[in-house]
Every structure is written in structure tokens, then in C-alpha cells.
């Protein structure tokens, strides 16, 4: 039997370089973001100054190559950046997350990447992604937005809904059906044929969400991303990545809430002693910390698998349904620990809960994630047959 040799860098530890990067990101968030989180979270105004600050820190379009003004970061570094910024400001972290994922898409698939990406990484260009439609949520293949070929390009007609970041975006990656199949286009949103509507959301208010309508909007040929008819292949692979980043953001917010609850419990006294002396307070916190740490390392494993070129769809689906669930339960425990003072927007706990709750829907609901996991466990043919049978019964 060949002896197993332990590598110099054990695979279940992050490198010293990544841990140092984490420390710097945590210090940056604490110094520049944390104090203003609550005021920004309660406002519908896009925080342009924060976006510019993130860009100056090199956090917008984090994985974009240096030749386009980015950092050329790897997936684990991007995950840690999203995590640590979210520890201080969830909405700022979403800007890091969104620009990282969309910037990577543009870099790999757009012919005009050299013209677009420097403006993105510099903080002067806001991008969003339009995939969901009013009648086609998780069923992206049922899209009705169409792109008709015309001289020089296409004309887009249709509506995209639940587009995060659309109120302040300059351009969007829009998915539309051509004669060949679903395709992705980079579309200017200030075109006269484009109209937008903002939603009144309870959370993620500074980032904003809404719908966008296209009325025969012209898109030049060089605005096609990737190959015509391969649009879904372009984006679906990214979900395995984006789900991990969102999960890390949820985990970090919950840990910030726990830090607040621990500090409160140490000095809040009842019956002559701190409530931290009660196991009814401390044991639930210990349980939540354990679940959050487990969820974090499943995220890191999924990102590591992706970096190694290995399959990670199952792991990404696991963290996407589980991490927001675990995080929300932890935040709610912290509300209870604080008591009546936490049932108010005078404290950030309610804003944290509302912001994290958005992740129950975005990038696929828990039901979709569990369906993906079940397909891996039982086989796609078995699960899809059961799903088809249920749909058939409903239609009768």
C-alpha cells in the first residue's frame, strides 16, 4: 500500500493569503460600511458613494482580469469578499456579488468586453441581469421575450421581472428567444424603447428590484453574448457559482446578529445577573454557530470543486436552500434574545432579517434546490417522472 503523504498546505484549510485577505476585508467593512448600514437599508436611494468606495477598493468586478481594471481574483477570494462585506452591509455585499458574477459573464462571452469592463470596475457603470419573466420564474426555458433578427442585429420585445438592481442599472444582460433558441444580449437601458418599474420591496431597498419592458429595442450584433441559441448554457452554469456566494453572505449577516446578541446578553441583567448566565440563552447561540460554520465550509467546498473543474451543482443547491434557512433562524433567535428592543427599526436586526429573506427566492427557491439534490440522489428520470405526474393531475 502506498503511504499517504500530508501536503504542506492541508486541503481543508484556507491559505494564509486568503485568511489575510479576510482580515483586510473585515477591517474595511467595520471601518467604512458598518456604521451606515441601517440608514442605508431603510432607504430606497442607491448608495452611489458606497458603490464608488467598493470600486476604489477593487471589489467591483472582482474576478475581472487586470487588463480590464479588475483584480483577477479566484472564486474563493470572491466568496470571502462577499462574506466579509456582508458582515457589515448586506446590500454593499450584493453589489460586490452582482458585479463579480456579471463581470465574469461579460469578460468570457462579450465581444465588447474591453469597452465595457473598465467602466464597470471603475464604478461608473452598473449592470444587472434580466432572466425571470412574469410567467416563467424557475422555468427559464419558457421565456416569451423574443429577439427578431434585423439588419445589423436584433429587436427585442417582451418583459423581464424580478430584476435585482434594475432601478439604477445602465445596462442589462437580457435573455430572449431567437429563431435559433434562447440567447443572451447586452442591452442599454436608457434606450427610449425601454421602460422600467420599481417594486416596493421590504428588504434590499438600496439595491432595488423591478421589471423592465422592451418595445422593439434594437440590439447591435456585437451585443450578443456567446453563441446565438446558447444563452441558457451561459447563465445556468453561473448559478452553481452565484448560489455559493449568496449563501456566504447570509451566513455572515447571521454571525453579525449573533455578535450583537452575545454582547447584549453579557450586560443585560435580570434577577440580579446577566442573561448570558442562562443556558436558555447560550445553548441556542452555540447551536446556531455550529450550523453556520458547517454551512460556510460546504460553501467553500463547492467553490473549491468549481476551481478544480469538478461537478458542484449538488453542493451549490445544498448551500442555497440551507444557508439562508439557517441564517434566518439564527437572526430570529437574536431578536428574541434582545427582546422587545429588537422589534424595531431602531436596531439593524429587522433589516438584516428582511435582507437575508430575499435569498429564499433569488437564484432559485428552496423547492428548486431540493429538486436538484433529489435528482442527484434518485436519478433525474425518477424525479422528473414524479413531477410530470403531479403536473398532469393538476391540469385535469
Image (spheres, rainbow, N blue to C red):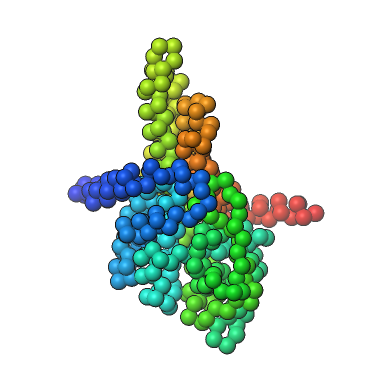
**Where is residue 274 drawn, in percent x and y?**
39, 18
Question: Would you say 395 lies left or right of 273 here?
Answer: right
Q: Nearer the viewer, residue 210 or 22?
A: 210
Residue reaching furthest to the right: 396
Q: Nearer the viewer, residue 55 or 129?
A: 55
**Where is residue 320 drawn, in percent x and y?**
49, 48
- For residue 111, which quarter of the picture? bottom left
Does residue 210 lie above or below 233 as drawn? above
Q: Nearer the viewer, residue 355 or 140?
A: 355
Name the residue: 32% across, 68% down: 69
Does residue 351 lie above or below 176 as drawn? above
Residue reaching furthest to the top: 271
Name the residue: 50% across, 69% down: 171
Which corner quadrant holds the C terminus?
Answer: bottom right
Question: Would you say 26 lies left or right of 357 here?
Answer: left
Name the residue: 50% across, 31% down: 342
Name the residue: 43% across, 67% down: 125
Q: Nearer the viewer, residue 268 or 78?
A: 268
> Quick check: can you spot residue 340?
yes
> Quick check: can you spot residue 236?
no
**Where is residue 64 drawn, in percent x and y?**
35, 65
**Where is residue 193 drawn, in percent x and y?**
61, 74
Amino acid at each position: 500500500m502506498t503511504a499517504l503523504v500530508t501536503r504542506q498546505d492541508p486541503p481543508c484549510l484556507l491559505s494564509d493569503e486568503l485568511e489575510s485577505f479576510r482580515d483586510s476585508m473585515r477591517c474595511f467593512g467595520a471601518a467604512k460600511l458598518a456604521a451606515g448600514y441601517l440608514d442605508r437599508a431603510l432607504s430606497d436611494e442607491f448608495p452611489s458613494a458606497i458603490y464608488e468606495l467598493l470600486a476604489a477598493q477593487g471589489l467591483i468586478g472582482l474576478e475581472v482580469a487586470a487588463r480590464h481594471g479588475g483584480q483577477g481574483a479566484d472564486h474563493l477570494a470572491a466568496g470571502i469578499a462577499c462574506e466579509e462585506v456582508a458582515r457589515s452591509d448586506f446590500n454593499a455585499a450584493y453589489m460586490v456579488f452582482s458585479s463579480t458574477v456579471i463581470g465574469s459573464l461579460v469578460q468570457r462571452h462579450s465581444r465588447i468586453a474591453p469597452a465595457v469592463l473598465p467602466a464597470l470596475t471603475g464604478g461608473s457603470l452598473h449592470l444587472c441581469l434580466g432572466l425571470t419573466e412574469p410567467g416563467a420564474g424557475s422555468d427559464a426555458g419558457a421565456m416569451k421575450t423574443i429577439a427578431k433578427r434585423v439588419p445589423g442585429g436584433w429587436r427585442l420585445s417582451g418583459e423581464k421581472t424580478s430584476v435585482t438592481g434594475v432601478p439604477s442599472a445602465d445596462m442589462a444582460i437580457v435573455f430572449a428567444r431567437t429563431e435559433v433558441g434562447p440567447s443572451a444580449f447586452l442591452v442599454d437601458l436608457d434606450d427610449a424603447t425601454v421602460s422600467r418599474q420599481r417594486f416596493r420591496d421590504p428588504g434590499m431597498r438600496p439595491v432595488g428590484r423591478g421589471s423592465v419592458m422592451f418595445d422593439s429595442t434594437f440590439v447591435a450584433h456585437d451585443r450578443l453574448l456567446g453563441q446565438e441559441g446558447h444563452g441558457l448554457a451561459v447563465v445556468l452554469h453561473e448559478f452553481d457559482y452565484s448560489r455559493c456566494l449568496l449563501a456566504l453572505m447570509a451566513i455572515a449577516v447571521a454571525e453579525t446578529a449573533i455578535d450583537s446578541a452575545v454582547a447584549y446578553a453579557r450586560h443585560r441583567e435580570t434577577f440580579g445577573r446577566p442573561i448570558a448566565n442562562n443556558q436558555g440563552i447560550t445553548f441556542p447561540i452555540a447551536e446556531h454557530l455550529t450550523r453556520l460554520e458547517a454551512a460556510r465550509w460546504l460553501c467553500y467546498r463547492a467553490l473549491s470543486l468549481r476551481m478544480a473543474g469538478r461537478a458542484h451543482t449538488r453542493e451549490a443547491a445544498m448551500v442555497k436552500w440551507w444557508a439562508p434557512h439557517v441564517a434566518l433562524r439564527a437572526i430570529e433567535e437574536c431578536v428574541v434574545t434582545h427582546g422587545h428592543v429588537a422589534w424595531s427599526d431602531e436596531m439593524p436586526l429587522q433589516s438584516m432579517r428582511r435582507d437575508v429573506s430575499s435569498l429564499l427566492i433569488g437564484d432559485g427557491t428552496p423547492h428548486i434546490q431540493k429538486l436538484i439534490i433529489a435528482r442527484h440522489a434518485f436519478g433525474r428520470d425518477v424525479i422528473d417522472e414524479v413531477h410530470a405526474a403531479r403536473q398532469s393531475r393538476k391540469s385535469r
